[in-house]
Structures are given as structure tokens and as C-alpha cells.
């Protein structure tokens, strides 16, 4: 049975070595809802991506530049999300993102999505990424980027 | 460190008690790609949903009817996906879905997405659902449905 | 031939009776791009929706409230978009929205989407809506709303 | 006023020179609905894209190949959709697509989306495209493609 797996998501992915949270604010779009009257579940992964990009920007780091100038992509190799309370149309939400770990070419992010109005946590999640070149071959990120990543995590 | 957690996804979620796979075929839409030239990661969760609905249909069971006639919704409380190889525009894919477990009001699905051309597995994943009424209060599914679900799992 | 129709889109839909523009700012999401390296064309209609909702809010008017408290929905009966230059990942864009006309239960919006960096217009468009109740029967909007709409247009 | 423009959409874009319709069948996804309980309006443009690609395929023509081997993209420069009746979750729909006209580097498509169950037309629309190279400079499509396109239209 997968009891163990579900419980495991309750505790933070990493107690040590994680960076500080970066917050991004969004308003829920009509397009993001479904006929259940709440946000469709796949859209939380879109919000994770928004949070991830703003995380990099807050660290003085442009993901766009990484792709365009450094031939360095960061595809997702694993994603998970735990849904705790539904986000609804027009809600203001805050996406909290941070790097949980970096090991070589692998980068672990974690996220928390909360409703601004009352602070209710709506979802938590993690994504795992691998640095690759445009042929999807794993590669070390540029030194400049490695230094910034290491500084983020400390 | 979350080594353990990542490895855990390699093995099937459940060796026993799972139902047979149901296969659904789809073609990758242009809309589903992103500028990396591959399918955007959140769209795999959309494919899981497509597979899930066709799973029910293959068992003589309509999710639409469940919502409309039985006041019974099946929101996702947890989702995860492991991305193994990128799906690309115009690929024919097969989505394999099955129920991994049912315990009371909780239903566990698992999925495998493969490329038809060569059988390459592109992604594997799981979702966990809770039967609720339209006020999002947990409820037992209708007896008719419970019998069908039990028959699926055996 | 439809030469005439295409040219017609070049000129503003309405020279008179239109309200002032309301501006909304967004950043292009990775999820919104496609493998052409630009934003997928359907996503401009999502931006129109974002602009429309913020238009109402700027006028002291909540579309969410209209749906929830007034049993009044505003589905789209016609949409069009002219694409002038591609929006790209991470661009900051401004969505300009205004009501072009109201006639009974019909509301006409128009939009302009521009890149913030240099003011380049990326797209222009229009949507036409009908006020309906939850059974999709056309209905007059509540008086309170009619007054606000009339005040917007003048 | 734009009365004229709206009426214009009622009649077929082109009485002459249009190709035969190609039909594609799809089932409405949960992801495609919104909280109004119907399909979100931008998703009809995704269906147009699906129909367009299948149109090419039915003519022995691969849009994927055009992009990959011929350095020839076909971005949308204009799109419009008239919504006549709402598509709903789990509906089987048929997308009818055809080329309305080709003039040099410009290609006009038109679409009709109907519900399979009763033939009810749900939406009609048009898109206009320009053949470009990967730098988005207009270009003639390859001769091989031009011959096929001309044969389609007759």
C-alpha cells in the first residue's frame, strides 16, 4: 500500500540546506478553473513554474538568459503536488518557491501556494530538474550560475 | 536528502490489488508544446485525466454521470509525475491507466504514458482522489459505483 | 474573397461611444509558449479575459460577484484576434481593455496587447458577450450593473 | 457600430475556391471546461489547430515535416470564432476544417465544430496564416507543398 508515500509528503522535503522562500503574487484566471468550480489541478504546476522563474529573478538571475545565451535548459524530471484546499476564480494567491537542494546537474525546488486573504495553504509541491544542453544531454550549468546557485543555498 | 523518495518512484506503486490497465490513444497537440520543443510538463496531468475518464468508461462507468446524477465529485488531492523522455509535437501516445487502490472514500490511480512508434515510456505517475459531494465534503460513492470499483480491483 | 473583412480589422471597431482603456500588466509564462518559440495563439484570448476582469475591477465592479450573487454570466459569443508581432517568454506585456459598446444584453469589448519594453503592439482583438442567467437564457444585467456600465461608456 | 461585421460572419467566408472539409473527432476534456460548466472559449482555437493539422494529414501532408525539414512555419496572423452553443465536458465533437483560400504566402482556413450526438453546430471560425521561415520572414512554401495546396483547393 502507498500509505507511506502519502505521509512522506507531509514533512518538508529537506530540513537542511534549503534556500529562503521567494514570494510571487498572482490572481486566479477564469481560464484556470474547471467545471468543478475550482482551479484545475494541472494549473498548479504552471504556478510552480511562475514561482520558479521569479525565484531566479529575485536572485539576480534570468532563466531566459540561461536558455538563450548559455545553451542551458532546465527541464522537469519529476513533479508532485499535494492539494489541500481549492483555489477559486479571482482569488489572490501567493506562490512561495525555494531551492531545496542542488547536487551536480540536479536541482530540487519546493513550493507552497497560499490564499492571500486568510493565509490558507492551498497546495504544496516539489519539482526536480536536470541541467541539459539543447540536445537534452546533461551538462554542468555555467560557472557564473553555479556560484549564484551555491550562494542561494549557502 | 530526498534520494529515497525519488528512487521509490522507480518501482510500481502497488504490486497487488491493482486493476488491469486501460489504454487510451492521443496525438500530441501543438498547443501542448513549449519553446523547449517538447510537451510542457503540466500537460501530462491533463493526459492522466483523459486516461482516468476512459478507464471509467471502459468499465461501463461514466464520470460525467457520477457528477451530474450522483452529486459525487472526485477531485485530486495528490498528483505526481516522473518524466523519462520528452513527448513531442504530433507524436502518437498511449496513456495506460489503472486503479491502484481504493480505501473508503480514497481512490488511487496510476498511469504510464508511452510513445506508440517505439513503445518508449515517456512518463509514469500517480494521482490520489477523494469522493466528495458538491460542497466538497467527503462521501461514500453510490453503491452501484462501489460495486463496479470493487469489481475493477477484484 | 475576404480581403474586405481582413482590412476591416485594421480600423478601431468603434470611433464613438467607447469607454477609456484600462491597463493590466502580465509577464509571459513558459507554459504560454509553443515550439515555435512564441506564445501560442489561443493564449491571447486568455489575456483578453484577464484584461476584461481587471477592466470591471477598475470600474469598482466584480465579475465574480456578478456570477455568484446576481445569477448573471457573461459568456463570449464571438472573439477575434489580429496577431501583429509575437509575444515571447518572459516579456512584460500590457493588456489594454475597454467596452466598445453595450446594446441591451450584448456587450462589446476591445483589446490591445503591447510589449512594455518598447511599446510594440503585439495583438488587437474584440470579444462580444451576452448577459445570461445560469441556464444560459439572455437576461438584463442587474440595474446596479447597468448603471455602472452606462457610466463607463458615458 | 459593428452590426455589419457580426452579420458578415454568418455567411461562409468564401463561396468559391474552397477545398473539401476534413473531419476530426475529439472528446471534450475536463481540463477544457471552466466554472461556467462549459468549454472555455480559448480552447476552440486549440481545436481549430487540431483540425488544421489533421486537414494537412488527410491530404498526405505533414505539418511537422514542414517545420522540421522545410524550415517553413505557419503562424496565425488572424483568428476569429463565433460561439453558437456551448460544448460540454465529455461531449464527442467533430471539427470540420478546410482551406478557404491561398494567395501567395497567405493561407485562409475555416472551421466548423459540431456535437456528434445531434449534429448541433457549436462554433464556426476562421484563421489566417502566413508561411514564414524560422526568423519569421515571409517565404513561399516549398514547391512540393504548393502543388499539394493547389490540388487541395483545386
Image (tube, coloured by chain):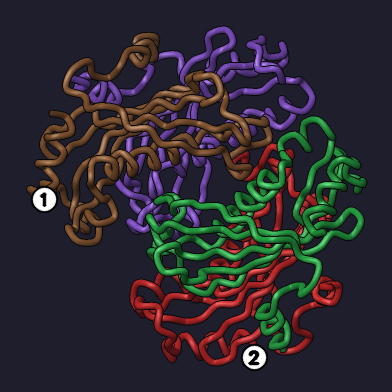
Chain colours: A green, B red, C brown, D purple
In front here: A125 or A98?
A98
| Residue in view at x 10 percent, y 46 percent | C140
| Residue in view at x 58 percent, y 33 percent | C39
Query: Please, which chain is the residue tagged with disc 1 on?
Result: C
Residue A111: x, y in percent? 64, 63
| Residue in view at x 62 percent, y 73 percent | B127
- Is C95 situated left or right of C61 in this image? right
| Residue in view at x 9 percent, y 41 percent | C147
In front here: B115 or C54?
C54
What residue sits right under mark 1 in the picture?
A: C142
Outermost residue on the left side: it is: C143
- Is D25 situated left or right of A138 in this image? left
Question: Is residue A101 positioned above or below C105 on the image?
Answer: below
Looking at the rendering, which quadrant does residue A126 occupy? bottom right
Residue D65: x, y in percent? 74, 29
Looking at the rendering, which quadrant does residue A22 occupy? bottom right
The circle drawn on residue B154 is 2
Amino acid at each position: 500500500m502507498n500509505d507511506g508515500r502519502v505521509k512522506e509528503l507531509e514533512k518538508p522535503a529537506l530540513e537542511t540546506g534549503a534556500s529562503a522562500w521567494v514570494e510571487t503574487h498572482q490572481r486566479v484566471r477564469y481560464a484556470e478553473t474547471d467545471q468543478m468550480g475550482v482551479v484545475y489541478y494541472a494549473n498548479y504546476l504552471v504556478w510552480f513554474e511562475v514561482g520558479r522563474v521569479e525565484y531566479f529573478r529575485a536572485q539576480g538571475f534570468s532563466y531566459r538568459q540561461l536558455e538563450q545565451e548559455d545553451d542551458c535548459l532546465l527541464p522537469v524530471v519529476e513533479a508532485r503536488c499535494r492539494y489541500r484546499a481549492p483555489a477559486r476564480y479571482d482569488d489572490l494567491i501567493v506562490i512561495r518557491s525555494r531551492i531545496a537542494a542542488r547536487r551536480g546537474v540536479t536541482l530540487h525546488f519546493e513550493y507552497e501556494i497560499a490564499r492571500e486573504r486568510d493565509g490558507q495553504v492551498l497546495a504544496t509541491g516539489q519539482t526536480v530538474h536536470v541541467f541539459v544542453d539543447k540536445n537534452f544531454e546533461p551538462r554542468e550549468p555555467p560557472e557564473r550560475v553555479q556560484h549564484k546557485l551555491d550562494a542561494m543555498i549557502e
